[in-house]
Image (tube, rainbow, N blue to C red):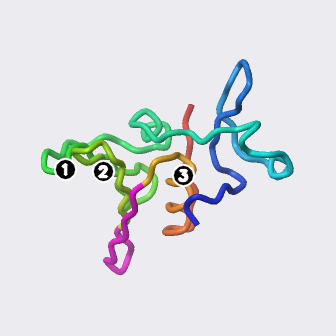
């Protein structure tokens, strides 16, 4: 689920002037490895995906979603990203993520919403 590329996932093109793009339906007919590469999740990408930094000394770094209540991404002391979601029934789900498309997919699975992107 989280590693499947879907339409709307952000990936990087492999060309001289690389840029970030969303997957289009026609993208699935060409070999992914030859044309695209996955984007490694960074603090900069969290900010681009509408997360806001909040101080939290006990876990390392903490980012809260500006647009989806209950959605948080922790950067632990080992530098790993862990997404966590507290739903309306107070169930907590969490998952480690390495790439932007993985975060997009699990957030969509948990909430039914897409992460908004700002340039």
Mark 1, residue position:
59
The span from disc 1 to disc 3 (Cα, nearest Å) is 23 Å
Q: Nearer the viewer, residue 25 or 50?
A: 25
Position of 118 relative to 82 (above/below): above
* Residue occupying the point 74% across, 24% down: 15
* Mark found first going from the N terminus, 2 or 1: 1
Mark 2, other Cα within 10 Å: few <14 / some 14–19 / many ≥20: many
Q: Where does the image place residue 74, in percent across and percent down from the top left?
A: 30, 50
Mark 1, other Cα within 10 Å: few <14 / some 14–19 / many ≥20: few
The quarter of the picture where residue 22 lies is top right
Position of 43 relative to 93 (above/below): above
Q: Nearer the viewer, residue 35 or 94?
A: 35
* Mark found first going from the N terminus, 1 or 3: 1
Check contact, mark 2 vs mark 1: CB within 8 A: yes
* Mark found first going from the N terminus, 2 or 3: 2
User: Which mark is on residue 74?
Assistant: 2
Mark 3, residue position:
115
Tally the marks.
Answer: 3
The quarter of the picture where residue 47 lies is top left
Left of 41 or right of it: where is 77? Answer: left
Q: Secondary structure at mark 3?
A: loop
Read off the magenta span.
86-96
Q: Where does the image place residue 86, in percent across and percent down from the top left?
A: 34, 69
Q: Secondary structure at mark 2?
A: strand
């Amino acid at each position: 689920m989280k590693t499947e590329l879907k339409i709307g996932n952000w990936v990087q093109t492999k060309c001289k002037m690389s840029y970030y793009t969303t997957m289009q339906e026609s993208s699935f007919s060409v070999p992914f490895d030859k044309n695209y590469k996955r984007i490694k999740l960074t603090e900069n990408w969290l900010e681009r995906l509408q997360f806001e930094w909040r101080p939290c000394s006990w876990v390392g770094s903490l980012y809260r979603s500006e647009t989806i209540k209950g959605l948080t991404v922790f950067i632990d002391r080992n530098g790993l990203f862990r997404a966590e979601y507290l739903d309306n029934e107070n169930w907590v789900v969490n998952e480690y993520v390495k790439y932007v498309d993985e975060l997009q997919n699990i957030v969509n699975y948990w909430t039914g919403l897409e992460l908004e992107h700002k340039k």
